Amino acid sequence: MDRMKEKDKFLERQIHELVEGVEGRISLNIELPAHTIQLHSDVPYSAASLIKLPILLEGFRQIQERKLDPEEVIPVTQEDKVGGAGVLSHLSPHTKVTVHDLLTLMIIVSDNTASNLLIDRMGMDSINGMCRLLGLEQTKLNRKLMDFEALESGVDNRISATDAVKCLKAMENEVLFQLSSRESMIRILQNQQFYQKLPGSMDRNRVFTANKTGELPGVEHDCAIIRYNQKTVYAAVLIDELKDSSEGSGLIMKVGKCLNDYLLT
């Protein structure tokens, strides 16, 4: 036990040394098996694409309650398409996808069009209801994705590092969800195509990772479930006010490497 405590404290020192002097505001919440590392973890930040986590959770809740059919086919019109990450905005004007495909695309390629279609289908109030149900105190969906007019007027989606970790843990452990729902959500997260941040320097042949990134101009986020053997780490790192976004993503990748080494040694 003493050795484990020493490992935890060493990791905490490593991470605090990494974040010292880095430009931008930094918030993190890292839950180890027997210790938690926190820095401004309850401060609300612009959520960027991390807001897609409660959308995913509400989607599977509605599927369980038969309010949403995963095989329902949703048309994607030209008016529905928005820019940023994703593939749906680049497909033909007569594209149709299932609800399950929308949930998958929203996470694995962070598709903004898919996210907005799900918000329309499920309702913003329902998604915010899921946030309250899970005790996400700093998280709220206030606008659709890529709505820069709303953003410029001060309306933004919010989340904290603590709340991002709560979302990840809900996907694994929350009794609100059936085992099949939890397994499906983790599988979607595991198939994430953007793994250049927390998992970027990990030995992904040995270490399990399931993550969700977020970015906006000056904003770099990532959160992940990281597992090796019987040890699981839940991590969220949020950074904003960056002049150089690569500095933020690079720092998050270094934090991920520390977590990788912690689990493998």
Image (cartoon, rainbow, N blue to C red):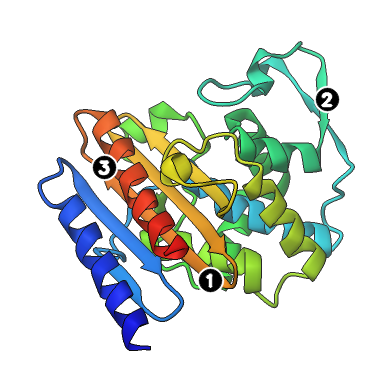
x, y percent for residue 163: 44, 63
N-term-proximal mark, 1 vs 3 = 1
Q: Which residue is mark 2?
A: 96
Q: Amino acid at mark 1?
A: Lys
Residue 153 quadrant:
top left
Q: Which residue is mark 1?
A: 231
Label 1 Cα crowd, 10 Å radius (few <14 / some 14-19 / many 20+): few
Q: Which residue is situated farthest in the front direction here?
A: 265
Question: Which is more N-terminal, label 2 or label 1?
Answer: 2
Q: Is residue 237 above or below residue 179?
A: above
Q: Where is residue 174 shown, x and y percent of the image?
A: 64, 74
Distance from label 1 to label 2 (Cα)?
41 Å
Hey, what amino acid is under mark 2? Lys
* Residue visible at 22% across and 60% down in the picture: 14
Vertical side of 61 occupied by 24: above or below: above
Q: Residues within 10 Å of mark 2 (few under 14, many from 20)?
A: some
Q: Quadrant of the N terminus?
A: bottom left
Indicate the secondary structure of the residue bearing disc 3. Answer: strand
